[in-house]
Image (tube, rainbow, N blue to C red):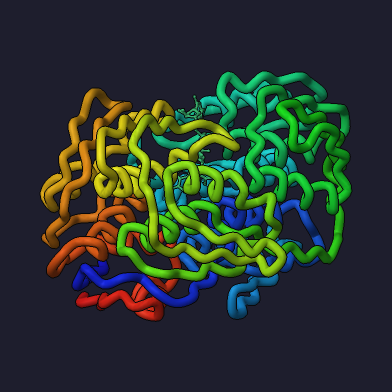
């Protein structure tokens, strides 16, 4: 358990490097099961979710060599008996479900506990299993455990009822273990899905349509490749959006670097500019600067699948709305439990009406006062923490370990840009 104490009201100023993307790192770690060679991941975020995924791999029998922001993974020694995800680790994060596809592809079977992760709504897992069932696998459930098995994966066309991100990733990795064409329709198109697809291509899969809503996979079957592959993980666009908002609401002048290719951050930069945040872009140097004056705009914010407004940025956006003159309606249709921060922000002085499980109305602008808060989940916890930095006086944030699942070295990095923050337990 971590508890943070912070003194708000100080502008965030200086330079901060954006970390590698959590939701790109997790599927790549799982996908390394498909490679008998080495998988080197660079720009790896040093966060708890990554540590748990690597722990799982190690327990399955993989060799892991960790360095600063990088890891070399060799899964050659994983045996068929190792295709079982340890219960405690599996329940720690949703990402553990990502081992389903690669273990099935490599060994023809896998056993996994129902995954854990942030409690942000129902978060069904049906599509993950329906996809592999369509490829010929049988699914057995026993209490909270799933067992999947297939002598061989067969060609099929599978329609995802919703463009689930990890559902798409699992289906792609499973399909790598087939030899006949497997077409996935209505797939997610996030850049991290594309990065996973590119890794599979480097392994020898043929992927037609990567980056579109329909992908056909021609896999390598059970003859696993042995390639030495290095992947530089793309920047975390949620961290980028979160720090842009943090700079804006604290009235700081903040330079954010390590942004990667301009195209990767275009949706977030456009979103933030549209909301009136003043951003100077320096794409050639992969950096940007946020600085006053800002002209925050009220209106309607609706989450969407890529390249729409990410649901993972919804809570910091609500914080921005508290510092914006006028009414902002926030509509997050994707998950029904993502307003858990509203109580905390209201306690600090925000005026927020919960309309229903998917919509809130934020009436701004309201000054915020520091208080004691508990982190309900990763993104909600981070929004409350930034609110504490923007508020007057002291805030204490309990259960900070929930935030550390997705944001690395928070105290050190925030202190380096002028935040007065310490970990007190
Ligand atoms: N859905 C179904 N059936 C399923 C699975 C999903 O109907 O079997 C629906 C969900 O109810 C939701 C929609 O599909 O309405 C999208 O959910 P999705 O499956 O895409 O979410 P996910 O893959 O479990 C990933 C990220 C989340 C992020 C969502 C949406 C990872 C490890 N997690 O989750 O990230 O919110 O995509 O972009 O990639 C976070 O980082 O804090 C986080 C929660």
Which residue occupies the foreground of this view, 389 or 274?
274
> Where the C terminus falls, by quadrant?
bottom left
Residue at point 56%, 64% (across, down): 288
Quarter holding residue 12: bottom left
Classify 282 as above or below 120: below
Residue at point 56%, 42% (across, down): 111
Residue at point 88%, 48% (across, down): 204
Q: Position of residue 410 (x, y in %)?
A: 38, 71
Q: Position of residue 65 (x, y in %)?
A: 65, 76
The answer to whether 164 appears left or right of 342 in the picture is right
Classify 89 as above or below 171: below
Quarter holding residue 165: top right
Q: Position of residue 414 (x, y in %)?
A: 37, 73
Which residue occupies the foreground of this view, 169 or 345?
345
Count of all numbered marks drawn on residues in the image: 0
Q: Position of residue 61 (x, y in %)?
A: 63, 63
The answer to whether 296 appears left or right of 266 in the picture is left
Residue at point 83%, 43% (across, down): 222
> Where the N terminus falls, by quadrant?
bottom left
């Amino acid at each position: 358990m971590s508890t943070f104490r912070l003194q708000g009201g100080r502008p965030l100023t200086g330079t901060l490097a954006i970390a590698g993307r959590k939701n790109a790192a997790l599927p790549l770690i799982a996908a390394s099961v498909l490679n008998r060679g080495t998988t080197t991941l660079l720009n790896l975020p040093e966060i708890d979710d990554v540590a748990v995924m690597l722990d799982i791999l190690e327990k399955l029998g993989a060799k892991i060599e960790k360095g600063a922001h990088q890891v070399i993974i060799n899964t050659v020694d994983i045996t068929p008996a190792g295709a079982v995800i340890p219960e405690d680790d599996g329940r720690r994060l949703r990402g553990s479900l990502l081992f389903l596809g690669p273990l099935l592809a490599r060994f023809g079977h896998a056993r996994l506990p129902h995954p854990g992760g942030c409690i942000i709504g129902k978060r069904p897992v049906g599509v993950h299993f329906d996809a592999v069932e369509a490829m010929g696998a049988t699914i057995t459930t026993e209490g909270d455990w799933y067992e999947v098995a297939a002598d061989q994966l067969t060609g099929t066309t599978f329609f995802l009822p919703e463009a689930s991100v990890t559902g798409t990733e699992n289906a792609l990795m499973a399909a790598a273990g087939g030899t006949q064409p497997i077409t996935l329709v209505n797939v997610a198109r996030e850049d991290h899905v594309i990065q996973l697809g590119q890794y599979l291509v480097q392994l020898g899969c043929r992927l037609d349509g990567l980056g579109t809503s329909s992908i056909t996979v021609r896999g390598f079957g059970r003859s696993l490749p042995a390639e030495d592959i290095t992947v530089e993980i793309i920047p975390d666009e949620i961290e980028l959006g979160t720090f842009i908002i943090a700079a804006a609401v604290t009235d700081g002048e903040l330079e954010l670097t390590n942004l990667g290719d301009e195209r990767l951050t275009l949706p977030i930069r456009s979103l933030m500019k549209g909301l009136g945040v003043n951003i100077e872009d320096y794409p050639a140097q992969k950096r940007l600067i946020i600085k006053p004056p800002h002209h925050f705009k009220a209106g309607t914010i609706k989450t969407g699948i890529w390249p729409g407004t990410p649901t993972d940025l919804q809570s910091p956006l609500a914080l921005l709305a508290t510092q914006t003159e006028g009414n902002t309606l926030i509509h997050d249709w994707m998950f029904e439990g993502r307003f858990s921060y509203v109580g905390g922000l209201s306690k600090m002085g925000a005026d927020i009406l919960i309309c229903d499980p998917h919509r809130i109305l934020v009436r701004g602008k309201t000054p915020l006062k520091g208080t004691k808060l508990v982190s309900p989940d990763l993104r909600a916890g981070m929004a409350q923490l930034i609110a504490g930095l923007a508020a007057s006086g002291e805030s204490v944030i309990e259960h900070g370990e929930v935030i550390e699942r997705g944001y690395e070295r928070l105290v050190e990095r925030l202190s380096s840009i002028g935040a007065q923050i310490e970990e007190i337990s």
